[in-house]
Image (cartoon, rainbow, N blue to C red):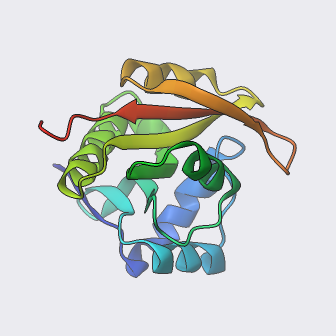
Amino acid sequence: MLSIRPMESADAGQVLSLNAGARPNVAPLDGIELARLQALSREHIVAVEGEAIRGYALVFAHDHAYDGEEFLALRSLIARPFLYIDQVVVLPSAQGTGIGRQMYEAIERAALLGRADSLCCEVNAMPSNPGSLAFHSRLGFGAVGSLATRDGRTVHLLRKRLSIAA
């Protein structure tokens, strides 16, 4: 049975393996960078089945000291509290099983509990990631801008407004 729980430091090996398999659609991580990101936020989650991690999401609140270029661009555009989803990876053999949607639902619940009124993320426009863009569109995300990144990519900056009364 699948469960969504907070990411722990003991998850690093499996998270790094999933990250390596998802490139170039996500930024590469190594152990040092993952530990740094874990120290900045307690919002990161993993999708676990038995002992195996089937997916993970790196998540930051709008007021975290995260220095990601896309996060900073969104923070300059959106004044209200939000949760930023930096990376979502699902094991290729588990894609299409609803794990991604379950992780997003868990992130949305956390956002509402924390009184954030939006979820934000970015999706590569160049190199193109049409599967991710379609997934986010189905979940209710819309474009709030685009950004040419320092590493040569172009990304769509996306936002999903939440109803705090929900």
Residue 77 horizontal/vertical position (percent): 58, 42
Residue 108 falls in image quadrant? top left
The residue most toward the front is 79
The residue under the point 85% across, 50% down is 151
In the image, taking residue 137 as reference, residue 26 lies left or right, namely right
Residue 80 horizontal/vertical position (percent): 40, 48
The residue under the point 45% across, 24% down is 135
Residue 116 horizontal/vertical position (percent): 30, 50
In the image, taking residue 12 as reference, residue 156 lies left or right, namely right
Viewer-side residue, 80 vs 84: 80
Does the image show residue 55? no
Quadrant of image for the C terminus: top left
Residue 16 falls in image quadrant? bottom right
In the image, taking residue 165 as reference, residue 79 lies left or right, namely right
Viewer-side residue, 4 vs 38: 38
Viewer-side residue, 37 vs 144: 144
Viewer-side residue, 114 vs 27: 114
Does the image show residue 36? yes
Whether 111 is drawn above or below 96: the answer is: below
Whether 163 is drawn above or below 61: the answer is: above
Residue 44 horizontal/vertical position (percent): 39, 63
The residue under the point 64% across, 30% down is 145
The residue under the point 62% across, 21% down is 130
